[in-house]
Image: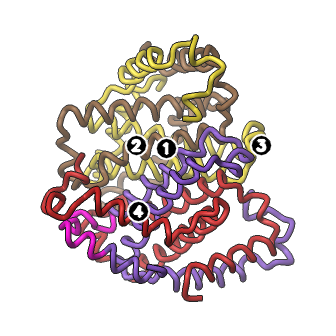
Chain colours: A red, B purple, C yellow, D brown
Amino acid sequence: MTELKDIKKTLAKFSQDREWEQFHSPKNLAMALSVEVAEIVEHFQWLTEDESKILPIEKRQAIAEEIADTQMYLLLLAEKLKVDIIDSVNKKIEKNGAKYPIETAKGSAKKHTE
Amino acid sequence: MTELKDIKKTLAKFSQDREWEQFHSPKNLAMALSVEVAEIVEHFQWLTEDESKILPIEKRQAIAEEIADTQMYLLLLAEKLKVDIIDSVNKKIEKNGAKYPIETAKGSAKKHTE
Amino acid sequence: MTELKDIKKTLAKFSQDREWEQFHSPKNLAMALSVEVAEIVEHFQWLTEDESKILPIEKRQAIAEEIADTQMYLLLLAEKLKVDIIDSVNKKIEKNGAKYPIETAKGSAKKHTE
Amino acid sequence: MTELKDIKKTLAKFSQDREWEQFHSPKNLAMALSVEVAEIVEHFQWLTEDESKILPIEKRQAIAEEIADTQMYLLLLAEKLKVDIIDSVNKKIEKNGAKYPIETAKGSAKKHTE
């Protein structure tokens, strides 16, 4: 599979085959999503920013798995809410472009510090 | 844009144009990711599971924006770690298939309760 | 120990004895706090609200440990920021009382749904 | 109020007066707790560790409020589960003392990096 939409179908079938749909309310999927993200955060909590930029290969692979889990729950949640992720991202990038024009945002870290 | 790889490029350019790269260590991106996910969770915290399945349109649109933010930080983080999300998801689905065979996982909620 | 202030001292000594202070920047403690809370959330993610009210004893004990971890990181963080938790809670309760007067908040779930 | 147990009673009354108990299942309180912690994390996400150690007074006060919110939800959750926080923390500190003896933990960051 090379695109999100193929993965979405595979994930839906995976859950249906195992009768896991009953657990997958949007509320529960949001919780599961937050738990997976915390497993990413856990890898970084005691590292300096610099250390986080040069991870050993095993750590990078472990985080890649947590990123995959996060992506899967995000897709499952979006699917339940009939939200098209790609479409939503496109709209948000456009909105952010208007909100943070290059001229004023450049060099300034206002978004990041306020 | 219709695929993650296009979005990835657009996001990279967006940050570069605004000189925001300096803030985007993997450690910081993991934190930002967790904050965005909490904004999804916030919408669901006081709803029942049933209510979470039939959201009013404005709420659904608000959540779609948070899903977009989450997807963007996940892409930025993956990019910094040189992790291919699609590839990682494919591998994880295969792994999960072996870990939870349909025959034993079906009808059982072991994964979900243990 | 029977009060937060005693625990605070014990925790400070615990970290000093092990030379862990170097890892305990407020930024890192905030991350660790979020990871511990996710370990609480993990216990509840696939349960219904009703199930979450009648947990088996072993599950309740496991969650008690995560609650303890959360409390400890919250104390460590407050200590680093020179924030008096008890004092801050008292002030926040007073503020919330003014924000949500009984007459208007009662029966309404406005805080919870908006 | 100067101790957790007084605050616990005040919080219980606060919720009862406003008929908010109906929303306070352990599952929902765990979610609310995670959302409050994310509001702490948000303050730190783009700061360096050093910056997080020297916060301006207004930022420190804003974080103090989020710490108060976190403490309140933690107390409410513990109350619902009939968990005594002080008792649980005492037990956990003892357990951690056995798990990380000073001689071996000192100078080593094993807990923090593995």
Quick one: SS at disc 3? helix
How many angstroms separate mark 1 from mark 4 (CA)?
A: 22 Å
How many angstroms separate mark 1 from mark 2 (CA)?
A: 7 Å
How many angstroms separate mark 4 from mark 2 (CA)?
A: 22 Å
x, y percent for residue C46 = 71, 54
Quick one: SS at disc 1? helix
User: Which residue carries the number 2 mark?
Assistant: D39
Residue situated in front as seen by the camera: D42 or C111: C111
Q: Residues within 10 Å of mark 3 (few under 14, many from 20)?
A: some
Chain of the residue under label 2: D
Disc number lying in front (4 or 2) = 4
Boundaries of the magenta span:
B12-27
User: Which residue carries the number 1 mark?
Assistant: D35
Measured along the vertical axis of the image, is residue D8 above or below residue A49?
Answer: above
Answer yes or no: do the residues labelled 1 and 2 have beta carbons within 8 Å? yes
User: Which residue carries the number 3 mark?
Assistant: C51
Chain of the residue under label 1: D
